[in-house]
Amino acid sequence: MTRRLIASPAPWVGLLAAIALLLPLAISSPFAIDVFIRVLLFAFIGVAWNLMGGYAKQLSLGHAAYFGLGAYTSTILLIRFGISPWIGIVAGGMVAMLASLPIGALCFRLRGPYFAIATIATAQVLMLLFLKFRDFAWGAEGTTLPNLGDAPLMMQFDSKLAYYYLALALLAMGLAITWCIERSWMGYYLVAVGEDEDAAEAIGVDTLRIKRQIYLISAFLTALAGTFYVQYIYFIDPNVAFSFNISVEAALVSIVGGIGTLWGPVIGTVLLEATSALLQSWLGSGHGGVQLTVYSLILMAVILWRPAGLIGILTDAGARFAPASLAHAKEAPLDG
Amino acid sequence: MLATLAQAVINGLLIGGIYALVSIGVTLIFGVVKIVNFAQGEFVMIGMYISFFLANRFGIDPLASLLISMPVLFVIGVLLQHFLIRRVLALGDMPQIFLTFALSLLLMNVGLLMFTANYRTVQTAYSEAAIHIGALYLSVAKLIAFAVAMALSGVLWLFLHATDLGKAMRAAAQNRDVAMLMGINPERVFCVAVGVSLALAGAAGSLLMPFYPAYPMVGQVFVLMAFVAVVLGTLGNVTGALIASLMMGVAESLGVQFVGADSGLIVVFVMLLATLALRPSGLFGGWSR
């Protein structure tokens, strides 16, 4: 693993945090702020996916299920019962955790590609069900969220800056949780499961239990992103909340950046979203297909030439320029 | 009521024949090369567009264009194995899954850029024709598609059981290492397996064209069906995939008939999840991963 890369990175993390905190104050373009918010949000979703898909190598393609459950839970509580999304966001996380138990029980029987397919199916089933729930979840038309103006207690803000800092806080929390897990016994168990499930089982790791636990955490975090997203765009329907693109992008940013590493999802999101924003400002938004064409080419290139992700390039470069005492970092193989 | 039921079952069986071509392709690649091809549906899409353009530009009947779409896709399959899949065979699950997954995304979105999202259809003399048997109504186009699909499945079965190359393929599927020791060239077998599998997807595309619209995302429906059929039919089992596909077609059709027009997919996914819960190794037992 790339633990050594971040063995003494405190100054770098501090610098990064300072940049992240000051960036929106220096740049006033609403388009740019919007891009930054997307970057933070998708990096956060990627971090949540990475706990499960990166460390334990349970390659889920159905994380939209939890994104959607989070989004719907807080929205239903808000519109039907007038409950603040601050409570709704936690409730959404709880619902996602509950849902992850039966879904996990079904999907964990399968490995590799068939786990991925089963998770796709669960997210699709939820989307199809919410298309049918016309009475309490507005069916296919979806609904707009009431615009309460500047209502911080209801997680609604006039200024995009507030959303930016909220997304930044989510990402920071996700990274902190990953950092703690990486260092705990749980992190080692997860990596053992990811490397070789049978071998982990043989040396006494309760693989089913550890997978269930990390799925709970991953589902909870993904649901928080769902609530944040609908509060940000003021609209929800099953195609937005359970969009297959959410599941894809969660996996994509982690793989491109560096699967099973703390910073991988962040690096991947910055690259992909920056590419996407550049393409959009260059071609305009009317070219459906360009963004995903480029994403898929990047993904294929990474898989064929850099299965450890872009973070591998950074570690290699770091090792080359690092003093001799740090050169052993290069010996640690980065496995994808 | 009985007539409605019979009609739904027949409609399901007919479309199940097409699902069978796609799922046999998926299960063949999985059995021999041990890769799940997430892009299989996109090759159905390519088959459809080949037939569409041949019909549109040169007035070639979609059924005749089968003779072009199948060889073209066979070649694409050989190239796919040789230049892409081969490179991830020694790697773990992540590269193996996401390589074909990325390919699926790529083909869909290139399709979107080249052909737009518009539905393309081909009208043939038999597109609207139907045979009436009592109260039952049989679409001629679907009947032909079903018959050709079953014939192709039969040819594949003969190929796998009666030719040396087919036997080599089954041997490689059972135990790659022993097959290599017996002098089987695995790379050649893999190329043929992926080629044949894509040719079947191309055939499915051409057969669909007289009664089904082509659009860039069309493959998604078929690949999801195929995945469910392949799990139900036990991974890597060609006959299992065929039977399961016909069952899925019937289940979908019954769902649409009796639960609601948009319920076909729910029935299919519920079948998948129920299979995973009750019998994860598929209906036809045997081995799974």
Image: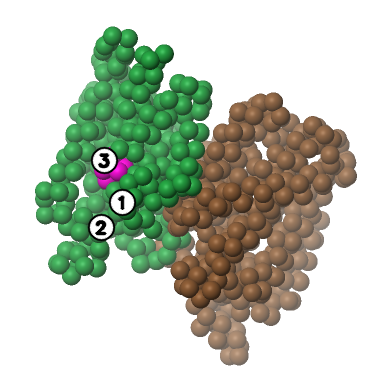
Say which amino acid is labelled 2. Answer: Ala
Q: In which quarter of the image is residue B35?
A: bottom left
- Amino acid type of the residue tagged 3 in the rendering: Leu
- Please, what secondary structure does the residue beneath circle 2 have? helix
**Residue at the image position 31 percent from the left and 61 percent from the top:** B86
2 and 1 marks in contact (CB < 8 Å):
yes
Q: Is B109 left or right of B239, judged from the image as shown?
A: right
Tell me the SS state at disc 3: helix
Q: Which of A140 and B215 is in front in this view?
A: A140
Q: What stretch is highlighted in magenta?
A: B238-242
Residue matched to label 3: B200
Question: Which residue matches tag 2?
Answer: B173
Q: Which of marks 3 and 1 is in front?
A: 1
**Is the residue marked by circle 1 packed among few (<14), some (14-19), or many (20+) residues within 10 Å?**
many
Task: Determine the CA span between mark 3 and mark 1.
Answer: 16 Å
Q: Colour of chain B?
A: green
Q: How far apart are marks 2 and 3 (CA)?
A: 19 Å
Which quadrant: the N terminus of chain B?
top left
Left or right of B268, for residue A187: right
Disc 1 chain ID: B
